[in-house]
Image (cartoon, rainbow, N blue to C red):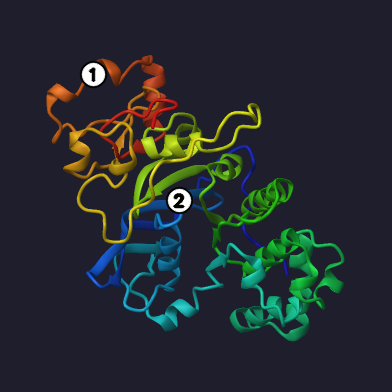
């Protein structure tokens, strides 16, 4: 049984309507102080055949955002906003309805295949069980599709592999099996939560190439959740950077990673090791991410930012379109005094460069600039 989706050519972006739309999503969790937002006003969309990267440190709200799409939030969680899959609202859908979405329309690749794959069940059992439930396949048809899936993700001797338990395989092979399991019911959206964690660099590259190939061949909309911007530089079309439950920067991959407009994005890039200069010291981000409930209506990154100004601790910056200047963030004209805005520092490119940047929809939520190397 082969996929019937239209292949997306490698040399052109997806042109179809946006498949997954998340708009002003909030997720609040119960604490001793009351409900506090773990996800605060997050909005993004993914087209068919596209890869969106969601980046940030642990605790920034990335996985919670993905779990909200599947309706797998902790007991007592409250949500707001909208999550639409091909026009169908998921946030208010019943649990019975969501059971037909999970695995069938939206599939999840967990960050640790050693725990997401049951150690006591054979690979064949784990691949065929939900195919028979969601697709109504017979035992023989499900077995044949499982062989096909393992072939797709390039597991050697797929027929024999179905009889083995996950512990027989290496970490990279287990992750490929987890991807095959996610693809079993031919989903529309693939949520990959830290898909390259604990894998060596060579195996990471193989997994990323596999995800890139699958989204092109099957027209999958893929959301990659990671703390490593280096992973996104290889495959993502668009990048959203999250901090404190909020998106602080978003845009095309080349714009966000090449001309970061938020000090936090700049800090994440500076913290990456550089193979060209192996003797250079790593540059960790000072401080720690904010605790749940510790963020008010101001910039969440302000306590750790070396570029903070008075406004950062007084009000929350909104996402604004960046001008053409490298790594510049627009100040909110409605709330920022003219004395703090210097037009000469916000537009230093030619008209054509400015227009190119504007059409890329590169946005950042910051009152100040983020020059290279700044903290």
Query: Can the viewer see residue 17 in this picture?
Result: no
- Measuring 26% from the left and 44% from the top, which residue is drawn there? 299
Mark 2 secondary-structure assignment:
loop
Residue 60 found in image quarter: bottom left
- Local packing at callout 2 (Cα closer than 10 Å; few below 14, some 14-19, many 20+) is some
Q: Secondary structure at mark 1?
A: helix
Residue 327, image x, y percentages: 39, 27
Q: Residue at x 65, y 56 (%)?
A: 198
Label disc, if present, on residue 343 of the rendered structure: 1
Q: CA distance from mark 2 to mark 1?
A: 33 Å
Q: Which residue is mark 2?
A: 57
Cβ atoms under marks 2 and 1 closer than 8 Å: no
* Numbered mark located on residue 36 in the image: none
Q: 233 and 368: which one is in front?
A: 368
Where is the N terminus found, in terms of image quarters? bottom right
Q: Quadrant of the C terminus?
A: top left
Q: Is residue 281 above or below residue 142?
A: above
Q: Position of residue 79 (x, y in %)?
A: 30, 68
Sequence-first tag of 2 and 1: 2
As drawn, 123 above or below 335: below
Q: Is residue 177 left or right of residue 373?
A: right
Disc 1 crowd rating (10 Å Cα; few below 14, some 14-19, many 20+) is few
Q: Residue at x 74, y 75 (%)?
A: 123
Q: Is residue 117 above or below residue 328?
A: below
């Amino acid at each position: 049984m082969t996929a019937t989706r239209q292949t997306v050519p490698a040399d052109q972006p997806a042109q179809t309507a946006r498949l997954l739309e998340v708009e002003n999503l909030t997720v609040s969790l119960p604490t001793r102080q009351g409900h506090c937002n773990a996800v605060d006003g997050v909005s993004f969309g993914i087209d068919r055949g596209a890869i969106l990267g969601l980046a940030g440190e642990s605790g920034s709200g990335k996985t919670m955002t993905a779990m909200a799409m599947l309706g797998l939030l902790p007991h007592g969680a409250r949500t707001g906003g909208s999550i639409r899959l091909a026009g169908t609202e998921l946030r208010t859908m019943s649990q019975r309805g969501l059971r037909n979405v999970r695995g069938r329309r939206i599939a999840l690749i967990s960050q640790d295949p050693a725990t997401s794959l049951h150690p006591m069940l054979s690979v064949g059992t784990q691949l065929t069980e939900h195919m028979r439930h969601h697709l109504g396949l017979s035992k023989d048809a499900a077995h044949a599709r499982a062989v096909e899936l393992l072939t797709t993700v390039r597991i050697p001797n797929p027929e024999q592999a179905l009889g083995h338990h996950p512990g027989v395989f290496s970490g990279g092979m287990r992750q490929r099996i987890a991807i095959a399991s996610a693809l079993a019911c031919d989903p529309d959206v693939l949520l990959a939560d830290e898909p390259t964690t604990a894998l060596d660099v060579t195996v990471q590259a193989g997994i990323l190439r596999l995800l890139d190939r699958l989204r092109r061949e099957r027209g999958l909309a893929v959301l990659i959740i990671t703390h490593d911007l280096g992973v996104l530089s290889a495959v993502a079309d668009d990048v959203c950077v999250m901090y404190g439950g909020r998106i602080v920067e978003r845009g095309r991959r080349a714009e966000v990673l090449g001309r970061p407009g938020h000090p936090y994005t700049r800090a994440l890039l500076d913290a990456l090791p550089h193979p060209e200069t192996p003797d250079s010291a790593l540059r960790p981000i000072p401080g720690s991410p904010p605790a749940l409930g510790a963020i008010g209506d101001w910039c969440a990154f302000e306590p750790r930012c070396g570029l903070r100004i008075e406004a950062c601790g007084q009000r929350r910056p909104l996402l604004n379109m960046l001008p053409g200047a490298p790594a510049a963030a627009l100040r909110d004209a409605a709330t920022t005094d003219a004395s703090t805005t210097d037009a000469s520092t916000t537009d230093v490119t030619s008209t054509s460069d400015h227009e190119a940047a504007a059409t890329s929809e590169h946005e950042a939520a910051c009152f100040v600039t983020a020059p290279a190397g700044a903290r």
